[in-house]
Image: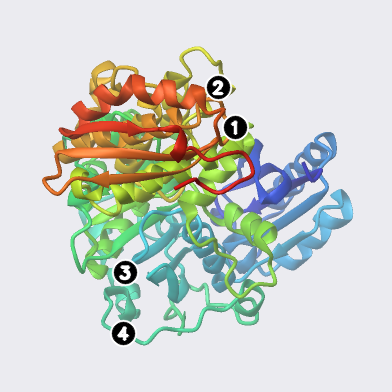
Amino acid sequence: MTGERVAVIDIGSNSARLALLEVYADRAFKLVDELRETLRLGEQLDEDGYLTAEATARTLEISRVLARFCTAHRVTHVIGVATSALRRARNGPEIVDRIRAETGLRISIISGDEEAYYDYIAAANSAAASNGLVVDIGGGSVQIVRTHAGAATHMTSVPLGAITLTSAFLDRDKPTNKQLRTLEDHIKTNLQALPWLNGHDDVAAPLRSGKQAAKRKPRENAARKPRENAARRPRKDATLLHKGKPVMIGIGGTARNLAKIYRRRTGYPLDLLHGMILPIAAVEDIYAMLRKLSLEERRKVPGLSTKRADIIVAGAAVVCSLAQTAGATALAISGRGLREGLFLNHVLGGGLIEPRVPDPALFAATNLMRYYSVDETHANHVSDLALALFDQLAPVHGLRADLRRLLHIAALLHDVGIAVNYYNHDEHGFYLLTRTGIDGLSHRELLIVACLVAVHNGNVGPLKRWPEYRSLLKKQDVDAVTKLGGILQLSEALDRSESSLVEAITCVVSDNRREVSLQLAADPDAVCEIRETKAMLTDIAAAFGVNFNLDYTHDRLKRAGSEVVP
């Protein structure tokens, strides 16, 4: 461990939040604790644009709590920001100065462009989708970033936050149809000023760092034109990603609450929000339901937080209008947002133009390995063997190339369940992954990886033990798990002593593709590996529908410190 404990503080229009993270060697990290306090600053500006005395006092009170929390947890680095409410408040700079004087916390008021930038950093390092929109619906404003091939092309901040719109247009109890039409027209007018939302503007704006984005601030007045800087069954996510149609990555409480409602309505099997994909048709159905209800009735909607019931209608209206304008067919939920973007910018190196990891899922898997103290040498060797088998057995397994990446991640994490207990660690691994998730994977991909982890030692398949998850997979996914599971089992057998004694394997496939000869380059001491591999050849043959034989004659075994004898 580096000894660094980082607190990320976000004072927003709706709430003040603190995330406490511990950083390990090689940039691995874990979330240690969180604090959240509802402030509703976005609705406490007076007619002159000042935050009221009562709201100011409440903000200072919460800031003292956050400062004491940092002290108690021996925080070594604090990243503190304030967003839309204090950005709009004429006395915002004065309030952050008082926070520093009275608590020692340094809070920076960031611009809308900068807020959008950090949302993008969070999404780019954690989301499965690489093309579409990153949308953070806050209390005071909405940050929108358009991405292509994982890179940001346009970003802006518009004054369409859930609190802002509710205060300006809606009766908090039960909005009238006239109020809702006026609200929807207002949202539509603001979004139509952004031609790149629907992809018609193909000119990409250069990505600017957070510091560069902070040099100019977008206008937050709702009356002004926003500025830009150049359902009843869960559906399988693959059917939602239509070619040429962008995916909306939703950040913030509005998106999370829509997902919770969807999960309760459909019986969605995974108890995870990050990575969940909702059909836009289902979101529109939820909005149509919510707009007809009174506040008291909304508070009783399964899945909806009672603290958000008064502003959810406006937030849902923004989601639906954004999807319609952009032509999006799906809403992908992100559990990562401004705070995670600020943290990753710090951990990955804020001096970079783009603090992004090449593969978010691989980065997340490596982080999980280190967090759960997985034997990395063994895990990486099993992964190398598994990928070699996948490539060489392509003529007989016939699997899609994209499944290779999922096999790689599953091989790295196959022993993660040992962190709970060695006994039944296959089941513990399945449980951990389906509860914690893996950034950069959709739920379908996550479930495939978890299933492979569950079968790596030859136990009964997880879909027989937990059939409720089958609804997220297609038939070809289940067949793929059988074959990929066989490859992972074989790879584990080839490093049974966890000593890397089998350095390489060659698969010789017969012309008729009915016979496969496994030829090893191994140390003479690889007796455990040979025994385990021989014992499972029958099972592997059944999984692939071909005969396997093992060539381990002494003249092919590698002598310690020497080359393979021909």
Q: Tell me the residue that label 2 is attached to.
A: 418
Please name the residue shown 56% across and 54% down the image.
13
Estimate the spatial distance between the alpha carbons at disc 1 and disc 4, rounded to whole Å: 55 Å
User: Closer to the N terminus: mark 1 or mark 4?
Assistant: 4
**506 or 539: which is nearer to us?**
506
Q: Amino acid at mark 2?
A: Ile
Residue 385: percent from left, percent from top: 44, 42
The amino acid at mark 4 is: Asp
Query: Residue drawn 32% across and 51% down?
Result: 391
Q: Which residue is mark 3?
A: 186
Is residue 34 among what the camera can see? no
Q: Say which label, 2 or 3, has the lower sequence index.
A: 3
For the view shown, which residue lies furthest in the bottom direction? 203
Instruction: Point out which mark residue 499 bears.
Output: 1
Question: Can you see residue 467?
Answer: yes
Q: Position of residue 143 (x, y in %)?
A: 47, 65
Label 4 sits on residue: 201
User: Which residue is at a point 27% across and 34% down the rendered structure image?
Assistant: 481
Work out whether residue 544 or residue 257 is closer to the camera in this orientation and state it: 544
Q: Are marks 1 and 3 in contact (CB under 8 Å)?
A: no
At label 3, counting other C-alpha atoms closer than 10 Å, the crowd grade (few under 14, some 14-19, many 20 or more) is some
